[in-house]
Every structure is written in C-alpha cells, then in structure tokens.
Amino acid sequence: MKFFVDTADIAEIKDLAATGLLDGVTTNPSLIAKSGRNFLEVVEEICGIVDGPVSAEVTALEADEMLKEGRFLAKIAKNIAVKVPLTWAGLKTCKTLTGEGTMVNVTLCFSANQALLAAKAGATFISPFIGRLDDINLDGMELIEEIRTIYDNYDFKTQILAASIRTANHVKDAALVGADVATVPPAVLRGLAAHPLTDKGLEQFLADWKKTGQKIL
C-alpha cells in the first residue's frame, strides 16, 4: 500500500518525507485555507518536496472552466494530480486531462457506481471517503471492497485511494480489502508506528542494558 499524507502543512510534509515512507500528498481547498498561504505557492512547494503525486483540486463547477483550471494546475509540476469532483463535469474533465497525459484524482466518491464511471473516464485515482460514510452509519470499507471487485473484474488500472481516514484501524482495514493508497492526516500516519507493548519492551531492554554498564560507542 502507498501512503499519501493529507495536509498542506509544509513542515509536516518535510518531516514525513524524510522517513522515505511517504509516496505522495493530497490537498484540498480546506487544507490550503488552514495554511493561510497562497494556494499556488503551497502546491508548488509541496511538489518540490515529494517525488510522488501531489493532488491539487480545481474549484470550478462547469466542465470548461474546470478543464482550464486543471490544465493550469498541471503546469505547476510533473507530479501534479489534478483533483476533480465526481460530477458529470468532473468526469468529462477527467477524460480530457487523462488523454493529455495528466494524472487525475477523482474525489468525493461515495458509491461503487461512481467509481465505475471514474475508471471508465480514465482516472488515475478514485477517492472513496470512508470516514464520511461511517458518519452516516454506512460501511466505508464495504465500498472499498465493492470497488476492488469491480476494478479487478475488468482490469481497470485506476488506483483506489482510501480517503477521509480517521484512525489506524481504517488504514489496516483498507489495506486488508485491497486499497492501493491510503491518504491520512499526519497524526494518523505517525500513529501507525505506535503500540504500548513496543514502548514497554523498549523500556525493559534499556533497563536491562543499563545494568550491564556497557556502551556501544
């Protein structure tokens, strides 16, 4: 599974990228707004930090304007993935941009039928929102399973990008059902390495080592 971080916080992205475990970044207008900085400057800076895909979202609602924005964003860097909503205008834009060689992330997916359309439109990524489905008492993981089955049935190359992830269990479950990518908040990504028994074991090892009075260096 690939790990993308869902943030526009430059410091967080640099720190996580330094681990070598970060495969890409997703942003959206809300995350950029939290940064308080210019949208285009932030996106360009992120593209210089990570080699993998950086999702930058259009804000237009009509296909013609959406396409103009998408083409403009694609010029920022080679690793831009233009993010479009799962609407008819977004699907039309996806088809055109994909045909021009641009990566496209189709976002706000909440059904398997929507995901099927995105794959037919040539999307590089489809972003089903797990947490938001859970919020209304639907099973976000079931959606990931359905999309995985459909894509495998027809050998679609669109990657399933599990989004709206809230917990470490969301990441584990998404991996178990075959999501290609998980995009997670920085805190959740860091939390994947945490376990109380790891901390307890390390504490015991260090205590025993101290008793020997030895040093490695």
Image (cartoon, helix red, strand yellow):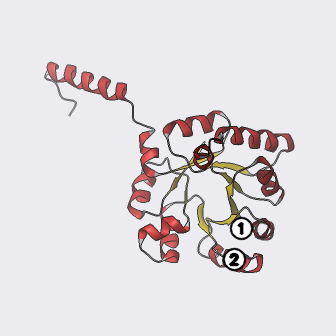
In this rendering, the count of numbered labels is 2
| Residue 52 quadrant | bottom right
**Identity, as a three-letter code, of the amino acid under mark 2:** Arg
Is residue 134 rendered to the left or right of residue 88? Answer: left
Dot label at residue 71: 2
Judge the density around disc 1: few (<14), some (14-19), many (≥20) Cα neighbours within 10 Å.
many
Residue 46 seen in the current view: no
Query: Which residue is depicted at the point 82% across and 56% down?
Result: 117
Residue 149, position in %: x, y?
79, 38
Asked whether disc 2 touches disc 1, contact meaning CB atoms under 8 Å apart, the reply is yes
Is residue 15 rendered to the left or right of residue 106? Answer: left
Q: Which residue is mark 1?
A: 102
**Identity, as a three-letter code, of the amino acid under mark 1:** Thr
Q: Report how far apart the C-alphas of labels 2 and 1 lie in the structure.
A: 8 Å
Q: Quadrant of the N terminus?
A: top right
Judge the density around disc 2: few (<14), some (14-19), many (≥20) Cα neighbours within 10 Å.
some
* Mark sitting earlier along the chain (2/1): 2
Is residue 205 positioned above or below 4 on the image? above
Residue 54, position in %: x, y?
58, 62
Residue 124, position in %: x, y?
72, 57
* Label 2 element class: helix
Query: Which residue is depicted at the point 48% across and 76% down?
Result: 41
Q: Quadrant of the C terminus?
A: top left
Residue 208, position in %: x, y?
21, 19
* Label 1 element class: loop
Query: Which residue is depicted at the point 51% across and 56% down?
Result: 6
Residue 29 seen in the current view: yes
